[in-house]
Image (spheres, helix red, strand yellow):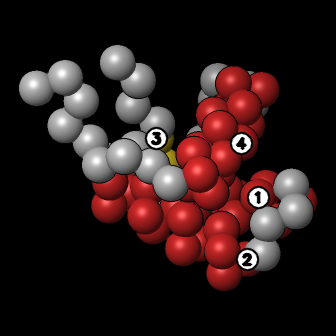
Amino acid sequence: MDNPRTPLGPSEREILEHLEAYVDASPDDESLTRETAVTYLTEQGFGRVEARDRIEQLLLKGYLYEVGEELRIPPRS
């Protein structure tokens, strides 16, 4: 199977791209929590509810995962 993940909708893809940019620009010792992600996304113009919902969808679809309080983005293949 080439890509077992569920496809992303346009808004989910946009959120993921913003989160990837945030992680890429962050120091290595800084973790990304749900609340940090929501705060960052609201600063980018998304509503809090939309940001939370999209993060949840990305978690359910396997594009994000949580380890303790930290959100992680698995490598894309």
Q: Which residue sits at x=32%, y=54%?
A: 61
Q: Quadrant location of the N terminus?
A: top left
Residue 8 is left or right of residue 33, and the answer is left
- Residue wearing tag 1: 41
Residue extending furthest toward the bottom: 49
Q: How many numbered circles are shown?
A: 4
> Cα distance, mark 1 to mark 2?
8 Å
Task: Decide: is 1 above or below 16.
Answer: above
Q: Which mark is residue 48?
A: 2
Tag 2's secondary structure? helix
Q: Quadrant of the C terminus?
A: top left
**SS at badge 4:** helix
Estimate the spatial distance between the alpha carbons at disc 4 and disc 2, rounded to whole Å. 15 Å
In which quadrant of the rendered view does residue 5 lie? Answer: top left
The vertical placement of 22 against 40, above or below, is above
Determine whether 13 is above or below 60 in the image: above
Q: What residue is at 87 percent from the left and 62 percent from the top?
A: 45
Query: Which is nearer the N-term, disc 3 or disc 1?
Result: 1
- How much space separates mark 3 and mark 1, taking CA atoms? 16 Å
Mark 4–mark 1 Cα distance, whole angstroms, equals 7 Å
State how far apart marks 2 and 3 are (Cα).
Answer: 20 Å
Report the residue marked by disc 3.
Answer: 72
Q: Secondary structure at mark 3?
A: strand
Give amino acid for label 3: Arg
Amino acid type, residue under disc 4 in the picture: His
> Answer yes or no: do the residues labelled 2 and 3 have beta carbons within 8 Å?
no
* Amino acid type of the residue tagged 1 in the rendering: Leu
